[in-house]
Image: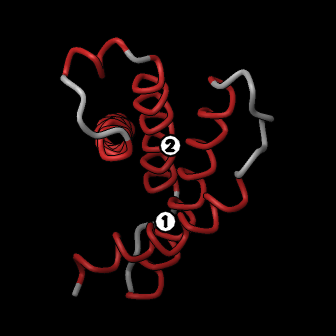
Amino acid sequence: MGISLGVGAGLGAVGGDVSYVFAHPGRSPSEYLRDPGFWRSVASGAVGGAVAGLAVWALPAPATFWSAAWVGAVSGALGGGAGRVTENLLNPCAACDEGVLGVATVGRPAGASWLVCPTR
């Protein structure tokens, strides 16, 4: 469980900071480190990744192509939703559930493709 949690949180944090840098190009590294939006993105990515990692650990081990797709879809949806809720909680202007359905919907195919592709 700890490995899934740690790997998920680490990958999510990296994804959060990379996506923030791509969305806000042209800054120096020190400017990113001082920007609270950067840290909100890292935190929401880490939480989403940790939830996805825990979901992969908690769900039954995939034995077939379709069970791997199912585990990926569930973990992607849960991780995406958790990351978005975290982002909303860290943003004082956003409602707690703002955009969660859309992110969870995108997380399902993304998670499914991530878990299925390595098994090919």
As rendered, which of 93 and 24 lies closer to the eye? Answer: 24
Residue at 55%, 69% in the rendered image? 108
Q: How many marks?
A: 2
Identify which amino acid the numbered label 1 is placed on.
Pro
Figure coloring:
secondary structure
In the picture provided, is 115 more to the left or to the right than 66? Answer: left
As rendered, which of 89 and 29 lies closer to the eye? Answer: 29
Measured as percent of width and height from the top left, residue 11 is found at: 30, 43
1 or 2: mark nearer the eye: 2
How far is mark 1 from mark 2, CA to CA?
20 Å
Residue position for label 1: 60
- The quarter of the picture where the C terminus appears is bottom left
Answer with the quarter of the image where residue 103 lies: bottom right
Mark 1 surroundings: few (<14), some (14-19) or many (≥20) residues within 10 A: few
Answer with the quarter of the image where residue 5 lies: top left
In the picture provided, is 87 more to the left or to the right than 26? Answer: right
Give the SS element for disc 1: loop
Mark 2 surroundings: few (<14), some (14-19) or many (≥20) residues within 10 A: many
As rendered, which of 107 and 73 lies closer to the eye? Answer: 107
Residue at 24%, 28% in the rendered image? 27
Q: Are marks 1 and 2 in contact (CB under 8 Å)?
A: no
Residue position for label 2: 48
